[in-house]
Image (cartoon, rainbow, N blue to C red):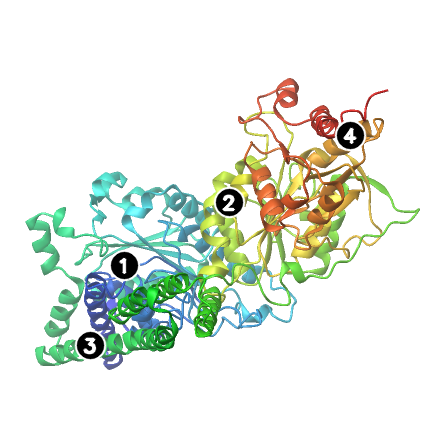
Amino acid sequence: MTELTEDTSTGLLALTDQFIEEVKHDFWICCLSREMSLIGRREVLTGKAKFGIFGDGKEVPQVAMARAFQKGDWRSGYYRDQTLMLALGIASVEDLFAQLYADTANDPFSKGRQMNAHFATPTIDKEGKWLDTTDIYNTSSDVSCTAGQMPRALGLALASKMYKTHQPNTSESEKFSKNGQSVCFCTIGDASTSEGVFWEALNAAAVTQVPLAVSVWDDGYGISVPTKYQTTKGSISEALAGFESKEEGVGMSIYTAEGWDYRKLRDVYEKGIKRTRHTHQPSLFHITELTQPQGHSTSGSHERYKNAERLDWESRFDCITQMEKWMMATDIADEAEIADIRKRAKKKVREARDKALANYTQPILATKQEVLDIYETIIAAVPSDIKANVERNSRALAQMKMPHMADIVKNARYMKQLLLGQNIAEKTALDEWLKAAYHAAHQNYHTDLYSDSDRAATRVPEVKPTWSNNSPTKSGYQILNHYFDLLFARDQRLLAFGEDVGHIGDVNQGFAGLQEKHGKQRIFDTGIREWTIMGQAIGLAMRGWRPIAEIQYLDYLIYGLEPLTDDLATLRYRSGGIQQAPAIIRTRGHRLEGIWHSGSPMGMMLSTLRGMCILVPRNMTQAAGFYNTMIQSDDPAIIVEPLNAYRLKEKQPDNIGEYTVPVGQVEILQAGTDITLVTYGSCVRVAEEAITMLKSFGIAVELIDVQSLLPFDLNSQIVTSIQKTNRLLILDEDVPGGASAYILQQILEEQNAYRYLDANPITLTAKAHRPPYGSDGDYFTKPNAEDVFDAIYEVIQEAQPNRFLS
């Protein structure tokens, strides 16, 4: 952006010719954005769009902020930033309407998957290869959840700091940063600063000193709730005064400006962002006295909760109105020129609306006519007893003036149902049309959950571990430690962080001694703040780093679950496949005593983290193999190490650091013919103990280690086992109906194994409550070897009552 002249007498930017031209351009952008908000709302209220949320009232500060935004910078924002997107050229007015209509073909930000005002710029190409983000304006894919942009913003800013202090020696590193000078611009509404993650993220940013610039748009309300009920002292900048510091390297800078004062906003952003870019000290811009002329969204009216005095003030202090007055008072533009700008903006927005609507509706109307043409041939061929119903259904479609694709498909499916039992050739065309419609729907709505590139987790080649007579026997944590040492030595993109990960090498010593060897910049400690640890992982992974972010115990994952479920797991999907974040989340769980150290909320993870791989190794040799797989992949993953295996002895493979464990495949640990026992993680050892006991009774158990819960048994090895044994037991430490229900559904429904069962399938799980403290509580709460023995013995005895008679 242009460096502007400063008027030393006022401290404000001087009215040079260049500045005046920039003002006029910014006013034009503001008028475009406002008109889009006004027309966009009408599009929703007249039924052309489903829902709308717009940026009216926030236009002026956003064009001012855009002047400080440089190529290579990043935005992590919220759903009021349409003006910023227009100012930076990331979005056109036509794009804004395409997303409002959920146009899967023309929404460039999410393929119609997100509601309007949720933006994203490409970071990968169609083959999944990284693009150069240093010469464009970047925005991370938005989420709707309030303050959900804060954790990711921290990570995006941290990536700049890392590139400033440690540039990886890789062929792609120059695609992500130029000397770490990129700033992450984070925007948030004032009411959302009440969320705990806002405070957690700002505290983390101030501690770590990263180039994060947070702008708070303060219009006095959180939907209908005034600021005085939201924020201490009624002012977020006053509430944060203790964070402020003029000293470099400590705290953060805090700036305030009225949202209608364009000249002051330009000055504040120019100086503030320049300081943040140079020092990496985070900054907060509290932009006050903003308005929201159309209320929160199209769901309601703000006149319901704003009194006449407030509405009158908002009319007078609308930011565009105030900018217009200032432009005339300073002779930047006269009334006629301003009127012309407004008139041209209205015309351009209407034209963009019309074009976007035509782009969306014309293919649908053409499809409607295609189906009606098929109906004509059907009507001519059907017998008289159903002709009236067929004609009625055809007329119903013909009378739809502006149907959605779903309306056409629904009508066509009903037509197909009307034709059941009719032996007419003409219905073949309808069947083919429906098949094509569902194929298109699959591409539009069901793709991009996981990577489809050559680096997808399921495509990483398997390299089996090898052992020899000289293979050393080590404790599990030593195997992991040795693996991480090799990994960090060969891959400069690697970072590891979390509570106690750095100095002491994590509580179970997986990184012991590695910070000293590989540097504090790459292996480091964080505060106790799981939410933003996950955010750091997301932002870093989006910008080319390969983070291994630790949640110390699986029970604590719930503190970091929100950014994982709402952000990381959905990123590829909600961006329509144009962004990715291959972060690895490391944690540990299972069989430690106590309510908050029992570590088996697997069902919670399975229901909330679709879009991530969930990997559950039974020992540290397996864990190292999974890390090696995922570090070669562009999918995100969570790897749950078995907590009680760090001190157990294992033989270290000779090719450690080279072997991989395949994702989505099970491993048959023991062959058997009487029953298939399916389990994973720490329960494998429980199962092995029970199998030893069962052998003395002549019962042969086929033991299968799931290894990978998401994705699950892609080769259907479990159903092959059940075809042989005809019996199934699922062993799991989660609560009843947790992961065991998921595994049962995968086996019986997805693999259709029910047809091979000679007995009811059994799930053996923990009790419905969390395990109490103490060894006794653990024994009576979680499944043990004796429970497994009894369950299998009873199944076999029921089927073969004479088998165990002496």
x, y percentage for residue 805? 83, 21
Horizontal side, residue 19 vs residue 200: left or right: left
Question: Which residue was labeled with disc 4?
Answer: 689
Question: Which residue was labeled with disc 3?
Answer: 345
Question: Which residue was labeled with disc 2?
Answer: 607
Q: CA distance from mark 2 to mark 3?
A: 46 Å
Camera-nearest residue between 771 and 289: 771
- Which class describes the residues within 10 Å of circle 3: few (<14), some (14-19), or many (20+)? many
Instruction: Name the kind of residue labelled 1 in the image.
Output: Phe
Q: Are marks 3 and 1 in contact (CB under 8 Å)?
A: no
x, y percentage for residue 121? 44, 68
Q: CA distance from mark 3 to mark 1?
A: 23 Å
Q: CA distance from mark 4 to mark 1?
A: 57 Å
- Which class describes the residues within 10 Å of circle 2: few (<14), some (14-19), or many (20+)? few
Camera-nearest residue between 198 and 326: 198
Camera-nearest residue between 735 and 248: 735
Q: Give the mark nearest the N terminus, 3 or 4.
A: 3
Mark carried by residue 51:
1
